[in-house]
Amino acid sequence: MTTASGATAKPAKPAKTDPATGSPKRGFRTYGRSGWAVALVFAFLYAYHLWGGVANLLGVVSSFSSFGVDVTGGIWALLIAYAAVPLLVYVAALLVGRTLSTGARIVVFAVGFAVVSVISQDLLTLS
């Protein structure tokens, strides 16, 4: 007796294709090495702004407390936004760029980095 006498193999799921081009859809599983390399390079650039936001958060709060000044809710909001914006924009760029080619993904991350730079400078000016 063989084991294949009554068993049938399940057919493999067809790859999802883009209806416009007929090529396989790109997603997180098909991000590719170049896509993840782009994401990693831009992660370091975004981390620069994230580090600055966290440093300002800690520095401003410690400076205010050393002078005996209370930190108001508005200043807290500005400092937290300054620290959170790079992370939020990076995640948004990662999600937007998941179905794009590598060149388009670079543009999305670069535009996101420019947005983070502008927002960070605006928040720094306000506080």
Image (cartoon, rainbow, N blue to C red):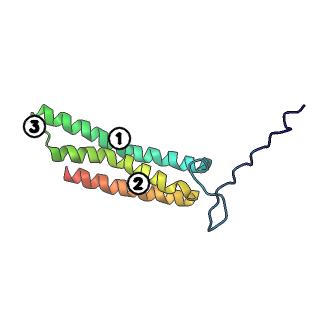
Q: How many marks?
A: 3
Check residue 113 in the rendering and tell me which mark sits there, or answer none.
2
Amino acid marked by disc 3: Val
Calculate the distance from the C-alpha at mark 3 to the C-alpha at mark 1. 24 Å
Q: Secondary structure at mark 2?
A: helix
> Which residue in the structure is indicated by mark 1?
51
Indicate which disc, 3 or 1, sits on the residue closer to the N terminus: 1
Q: Quadrant of the N terminus?
A: top right
The three-letter amino acid code for the residue at tag 1 is: Trp
Q: Residue at x 30, y 52 (%)?
A: 120
Residue 83 pos. (x, y %): 31, 44
**Most extreme residue toward the right, as rendered?**
1
Residue behind mark 3: 69
Q: Nearer the viewer, residue 95 or 15?
A: 15
- Few, some or many residues within 10 Å of mark 2 (<14, 14–19, 20+): many
* Neighbours of disc 1 within 10 Å: few (<14), some (14-19), many (20+): few
- Identify the element where label 1 is drawn: helix
Most foreground residue, 13 or 27: 13
Q: Where 114 sits versus 70, above or below?
A: below
